[in-house]
Image (cartoon, rainbow, N blue to C red):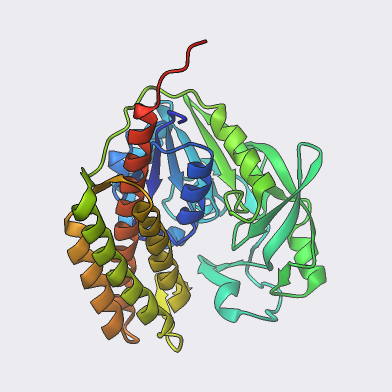
Amino acid sequence: MNHLKIALYIGKGASHSWIWLVDTLDKYGFRNILFITDVSTAKADVLVMSGGDPFAIFSSVQQKGVSKIRKFIEGGGTYLGICAGTYFALKFHDDPYPWLNLVKGEISNFSVNPPSNTRMPHKYQVPYRNGFVFHPVREEVVLNYCGNSLKAPLYGGPGIVSADAESLAWYKGFTKKTLFLCDRKAAKKTLLGTSALLSKKVKKGHLLLFGPHFEHPYYPDANKELIEMLSQIAPLGYPFEIAGEPVTGDKKRTWTKSLRRWISNGRLAAFGLENYHWKIGEKIYDPERLAYFFETSFNLVQGFEQKEKIFIRDNLLEEAKALALHVRRLGPDPKEAEILLEGVKQFTSQLYSLHFSTLQQFQQLQPTQKP
């Protein structure tokens, strides 16, 4: 296991894409992950702010949280921003919102008068001061990374023009999988040639800012590059914290069976909400987002069922039941949808913590190999 301690923000404003990161980190042995909703608890080598809504992130962390993040970076921590987490770190307007604002520059997808939208209007633009942040394309893009072509998906991330940081990758082109949300010519003019990945030293710390999602599980080449960057960070020795209590035998089987049943109920109920969409902050959420968390949780429990000894938390049975019942009665109310979204994020993160604790016990039991 890699001993790098990673604090991952999953609070308000964080979308489902942090699951992609966790699965990729798990695949490469990065399992010392702390799931946080309060950035002041980020006692780690790396703080990750991933995809979602930077407006909602700020409404949660507030100015006090921004100051804590700055202090974390300046003291030697690494800030990893992806998509929304990158916007949160940029200063791209003369009158910026009070986010981190640690990298000065422009984003090519900000305009007072964006190009005409041609599809997915609910994904196309978000108001920012006197203009709009707009998203010319979605899905797969081609990057110039270290002199080679690298594919990664883009889901609202920026095109950056900045002399205040080192550019590690540029948008190079599109593929057959690229979805154009505006005219192709306008999309090319907006995005191609701008920076997709920035690196900057800030006092003792470091920023890594991604527009595209290098962590997406369908892009193993991009995954490897992300892991290589993380592997260059020297761990400070934060211990792995075991979550839950160990169980075996009948108690394990009863717990996993009951948990799987309630998660399955929640998953089916979420898929049945196909006629609903909810505006939470500045983003539109659909039932598939909720179902994705239940699907991930279901898969984690299936993994527990295959192991003889696992770590559990008894309270998760009641939480799973409450979430499933909440989904069943969910309607068009965005406030209720937000409460459910935050609850299912917390639930999924707790299962991941138990998953990592279960894996850690096996590593500790492995005999030390002699040289």
| Residue 254, position as x, y percentages in the image | 22, 60
321 displayed left or right of 118:
left
| Residue 10, position as x, y percentages in the image | 37, 54
Q: Is residue 133 visible?
A: yes
| Residue 226, position as x, y percentages in the image | 60, 40
The residue closer to the viewer here, 206 or 270, is 270
The residue closer to the viewer here, 1 or 309, is 309
Q: Is residue 67 visible?
A: no
129 displayed left or right of 161:
left
Q: Which residue is drawn at 20% across and 63% down?
A: 317
Examine the rendered structure and indicate whether residue 28 appears above or below residue 219: above
How many numbered discs sit on the rendered protein? 0
Q: In which quarter of the image is residue 316?
A: bottom left
Q: Residue at x 29, y 83 (%)?
A: 328
8 displayed left or right of 311:
right
Q: Residue at x 35, y 52 (%)?
A: 304
- Where is the N terminus found, in terms of image quarters? top left
The residue closer to the viewer here, 33 or 204, is 33
Q: Residue furthest bottom?
A: 275
Q: Residue furthest top?
A: 371
| Residue 128, position as x, y percentages in the image | 52, 65
Examine the rendered structure and indicate whether residue 83 appears above or below residue 148: below
The residue closer to the viewer here, 44 or 88, is 44
223 displayed left or right of 283:
right
